[in-house]
Image (cartoon, grey):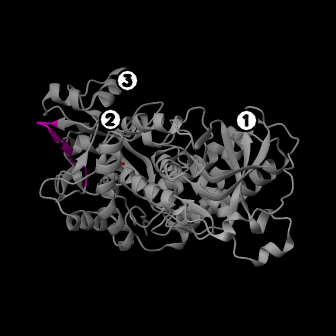
Amino acid sequence: MQKTEVLVIGSGLAGIIAALTAADKGAKVTIVTKTESIMSGSTPWAQGGIIYKGDNDSPEQLTSDILIAGDGASWEPAVHQLVELGPKLVKEILIDKYSVAFDYSNNNLDFTEEGAHSVRRIIHSKDQTGKAIHETIIPYLLNHPNISILTEHTVIDLLTLSHHSKNPQDIYIKPACFGAFILNNQTGKVFPIYANNTILATGGLGQIYINTTNPEESTGDGIALAYRAGARLMNLHYIQFHPTTIYSEHERFLVSESVRGEGAILINKFGHRFMENNPQKELAPRDVVARQIYEEMLNTNHPCVYLDVRHLDSKWIVERFPTINEHLLQLGIDMTKEPIPVVPAAHYSCGGVGVSLKGRTSLRRLYAVGEVSCTGVHGANRLASTSLLEALTWGWVAGNEVLQVDGDDNYFPEINEWQDGIDDIDNALIAQDWLTIKNTMWNYVGLIRTHQRLHRAHQTLRHLQNEIEDFYRKAKMSKDIIQLRNGVTTAYAVTNFAIEDRINRGSHFIKF
Ligand code: SIN
């Protein structure tokens, strides 16, 4: 039997910090990721930066900014933990321990600004902060004697006492997770890994929408795994849409909010600056800006609006945002000379698997960190650049907490062997089912919802989920069928949360 003390599922910032924290203190850790590269998830895609502490800043001011953005739905103890611990960990772990190459000006850390922040307090590495952090830390992970890494391995389901134990008495004890069933993507072999403690760090769910800033692996896996295992989910309907992604035929590449933080303005096709009358102008909270863009597109009958930086110093803009500039040039757009066509896209799940201040879920021996979790920090709408900070903070906290193993955490019951299906996968079905999920979510459970749209989505997804479950049960296991099953489960769960909440708050907006 393959056994580890800590099983970490996912390799973004939250997962790798949890793994390193536990491994540094002597725990044997196994990291599993379904991707070919360990450098996956949304972390390397994070452009803007990470909150530190600005000049004339204070914990009270940061707390207030987070609570205002969260629109009354944040959990204050979690916000306090983030605000008190987060910047300390940025200093101790990212700056002092790993020497991440943040940008400096005049020997001081350079602060940028993003929407709804009252001061400049975000440190960054050009416009690829997440990549700089990830690339710096990954080598420590690869060389750590206590860490084993399995890439190209996809988790099928979490092992729980209530679902998998052969001992009928186990359903009477407090539900707990003791590892996972895992598919080797290359050999097709399925095997269990037993773990004293398991940490979900699977990232987001953006791929359930047709337009998203997320990488292709963000298929909502952790939400679906936790749901099937019986862990509590929270705030799933609070999906944050990023206001500005490049409007192009093939993709939605993020144009960081820090571009607006540095002075870019939003105009419609007639050149009218439509955020001008908002007190915070282009730096209003994301949900406000995204919905205004959506309205503007409808009112002008145009498929996008434009982000304009032509009034800023062109040499500086190119140096400050090299990745975005390069990407735009490849699409034939010179941002120093012409406005950038932009549209909103699904960006971040503010809800997720509910966790305590220590990262514990409602299921014993199961933790969740990073975007898959719901710590309560983000409430109904996340403040920009809090996600890397939350990943670092809860990754560190959970990495310490898993070391507190109690007697029951060593219980591993006998389980039934994995039974594989026999049917070959029909890729046409997979592709069409994904299109149904993505279009349904975008049109009916998107930026602007109505009861009619939500009920239509509910019916469509309920039916599709039944079909896919049937298809999954008969299929030879593959990453594609596992992701599809997770995607539809997560989409259906998001829709159910949206139907049940009749109060418009933050990113959840129902037009009556
Ligand atoms: C951005 O750079 O606009 C994204 C940063 C974030 O979502 O926090």
> Residue 419's x, y, as percent?
87, 49
Picture quadrant of residue 404: bottom right
Residue displayed at 65% across by 51% down? 486
Q: Nearer the viewer, residue 228 or 415?
A: 415
Residue displayed at 23% across by 39% down? 270
Q: Amino acid at mark 1?
A: Ala
Q: Amino acid at mark 2?
A: Pro
Residue displayed at 25% across by 43% down? 258
Indicate whether 191 appears above or below 353: above
> Mark 1, residues whose alpha carbon is within 10 Å: few (<14), some, or many (≥20)?
few
Residue beneath disc 3: 331
Of the residues under marks 3 and 2, which one precedes in the sequence? 3
Label 3 – label 1 distance at C-alpha: 30 Å
> Mark 2, residues whose alpha carbon is within 10 Å: few (<14), some, or many (≥20)?
many
Residue projecting furthest to the bottom: 172
Residue beneath disc 2: 341
Indicate whether 318 appears above or below 59: above
Secondary structure beneath label 2: strand
Of the residues under marks 3 and 1, which one precedes in the sequence? 3
Secondary structure beneath label 1: helix
Secondary structure beneath label 3: loop
Any mark on residue 407, and which?
none
> Residue 372's x, y, as percent?
52, 56
Q: Residue 267, can we see it?
A: no
Specify whether tag 3 is near ligand 1 (CB below 8 Å). Answer: no
Q: Could you tell whether 132 is left or right of 40 in the image? A: left
- Report the quarter where the C terminus lies: bottom left
Which segment is the magenta one? 105-115
Q: Nearer the viewer, residue 452 or 177?
A: 177
Label 2 – label 1 distance at C-alpha: 33 Å
Label 3 – label 2 distance at C-alpha: 11 Å
Residue beneath disc 1: 428
